[in-house]
Image (tube, rainbow, N blue to C red):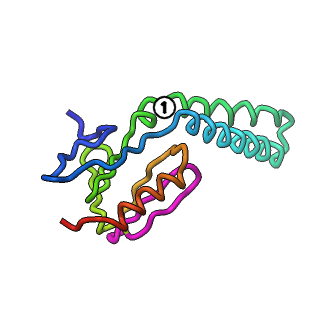
């Protein structure tokens, strides 16, 4: 059996409670990939124009096809991922567990929330419908954490 899982597999400790769960939003996933496709199309066309290719339009087709294939191929895994916030830890896919007292920073990047630990590990909660609300919820738990 693989060690990879899309949802938390870490057991809760005694008296530990799940405060919130964070799953990706399908609409946000599609929007982010539409923006990525637009950028890939522009870059592809720009590169072909820069090298003097008379068929610049093929850069748009290639950029769109590449991003659309990637979006389709990884959607089932990306959209099934879930993170659980407890009163003590942030539990990620598989056995990832970040104690709240080890979180150094909570950043945002596009529609994602990035957790940075004191040890330098980085974890991404991707495709959040409201990344600022996700960040605020984790920050609130961090402020009221129990170090047990």
Residue 56, position in %: x, y? 82, 37
The image shows a total of numbered marks equal to: 1
Q: For residue 119: magenta?
A: yes
Q: Residue at x 69, y 42 (%)?
A: 40
How far from the left and from the top, in percent, is residue 12?
18, 48
- The part of the chain drawn in magenta is 104-120
The quadrant where residue 37 appears: top right
| Side (left or right) of 101 relative to 132 | left
- Label 1: state its secondary structure: helix
- Quadrant of the frame with the N terminus: top left
The secondary structure making up most of the magenta span is strand
Q: Residue at x 21, y 46 (%)?
A: 10
Q: Is residue 119 above or below residue 1?
A: below
Residue 131, given in percent of the width and then of the height, sits at: 53, 51
When the figure is inspected, residue 108 is found, relative to residue 104, above or below; the finding is above
In the image, residue 27 lies in the stretch drawn in magenta: no
Which one is in front, 32 or 86? 86
Q: Identify the image quadrant of residue 23.
A: top left
Q: Quadrant of residue 88?
A: bottom left
Disc 1 target residue = 75
Closer to us: 55 or 81? 81
What residue is at 83 percent from the left and 33 percent from the top?
Answer: 55
Q: Local crowd at mark 1 within 10 Å, few (<14), some, or many (≥20)?
A: some
- Residue 38 percent across, percent down from the top left: 72, 40
Rendered residue at 54%/55% (across/down): 132
Q: Quadrant of the C terminus?
A: bottom left
Considering depth in this image, is 119 or 106 the residue closer to the camera? 106
């Amino acid at each position: 059996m693989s060690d990879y899982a899309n949802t938390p597999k870490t057991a809760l400790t005694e008296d530990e409670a799940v405060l919130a769960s964070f799953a990706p939003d399908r609409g946000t996933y599609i929007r982010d990939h539409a923006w990525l496709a637009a950028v890939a199309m522009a870059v592809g066309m720009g590169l072909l124009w820069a090298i003097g290719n008379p068929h610049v339009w093929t850069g748009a087709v290639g950029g769109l096809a590449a991003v659309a294939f990637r979006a389709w191929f990884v959607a089932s895994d990306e959209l099934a991922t879930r993170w659980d916030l407890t009163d003590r830890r942030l539990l990620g896919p598989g056995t990832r567990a970040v104690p709240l007292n080890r979180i150094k920073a909570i950043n945002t990047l596009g529609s994602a929330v990035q957790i940075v630990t004191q040890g330098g590990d980085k974890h991404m909660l991707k495709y959040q419908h409201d990344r600022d609300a996700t960040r605020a919820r984790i920050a609130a738990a961090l402020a009221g954490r129990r170090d047990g």
